[in-house]
Image (cartoon, rainbow, N blue to C red):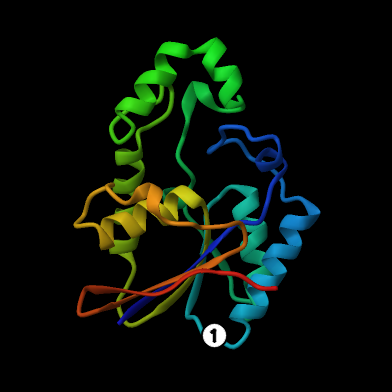
Amino acid sequence: MKKLILVRHGETTMNLQKLYYGFLDADLTEKGVEQVKSAREILKDMDYDEIYSSDLKRAYKTAEIINHKGLEIKVSKEIRELNFGIFEGYTYQELKEKYPEQLLISQKEWKTYNFENGESPSDLQKRVVNFVESLEDNKTYLIGTHWGVICTMLSYYFANKTLDSYWKYKIENGSVTIIEFKDNYPLLCGLNWKGV
C-alpha cells in the first residue's frame, strides 16, 4: 500500500493580496505558520517513511514544521504549484485590464489553456501524476505542497483520470488530505483536515 499525506502550505503574503501566483516564491505569514503548526498537531501520531516538499519556500517551510520525525526533506519541482506565466503577480482586476483577452480564454478553456510563459492545468496534472507514480509502494509519504497540486491529484484519481472535479475540493491553507492506494486502487481517507 502507498499512502500520501498531503499538506497545503500555510497562508502567504500573496494569498492576502489575492494575487495569481504559482512559481512566485511567497513567504508564509504569521497566521500561515500557525496554520501549519496546527497541521503538525494532527500529524504528530502519524508515521511516515519519507517527506517531500515542493522547492518553493512556502511549501518547504511547511514541510520543515510538519516534519515531526526530523527526516531529510526531499525536494521536487514536480509538486510545485501551477505556473501562471504572465498572470503571475497580478490580481484578477489587474488582469481584466492588462490581459483581458487572455483572461477570457483562460476561463473558457481552463483545462488546456497554456498560460503564456507558463503551463496549463493539464500540464500540471501530468507532472503531479508522474510524481505520484514514481513513488515506491509500501511506503507512507508526507508531502508539503500546494492547492493546485492536491486538486489535480484528487481529480485524476477520483474523477476518472480527468480534471473534471478540479474545482470541487475545498483545500484550505495548512490543511491535511490523505490518499491511500491499495493494489493501485485510490481511497480518499481524509480531506481538508485542519487543526483548531
Within-10-Å neighbours for mark 1: few <14, some 14–19, many 20+: few
Instruction: Determine the image quadrant of residue 82.
Output: top left
Residue 169, quarter of picture: bottom left
Relative to 110, say whether 189 is above or below: below
- Residue 79 is left or right of residue 1, and the answer is right
Residue at the right extreme, as displayed: 30
Q: Residue drawn at (65%, 42%), measured in percent from left and top? A: 15
**Which part of the image, by quadrant, shows the C terminus?**
bottom right
Locate residue 79, reporting x and y percent.
Answer: 45, 52
Q: Nearer the viewer, residue 83 or 159?
A: 159
Give how far across and how far down residue 99 sits, in percent.
49, 13
Q: Residue 19: percent from the left, percent from the top?
A: 62, 32
Q: In the rendered image, which quarter contains the N terminus?
A: bottom left
> Residue 133's quadrant in the figure?
bottom left
Q: Is residue 56 above or below residue 188?
A: above
The number of discs equals 1
Which residue shows up at 52% across the image and 24% down it? Answer: 87
Q: Amino acid at mark 1?
A: Met
Q: Nearer the viewer, residue 80 or 148?
A: 148
Work out whether residue 114 can be spotted.
no
Mark 1 lies on residue: 46
Percent from the top left, x then y, of residue 185?
21, 74
Residue at screen point 56% across, 11% down = 97
Foreground residue, 81 or 152?
Answer: 152
Q: Is residue 97 above or below residue 27?
A: above
Residue at the far bottom in the pictured view: 45
Q: Tell me which residue sits at (56%, 25%) in the image.
A: 92
- SS at mark 1 in the image: loop
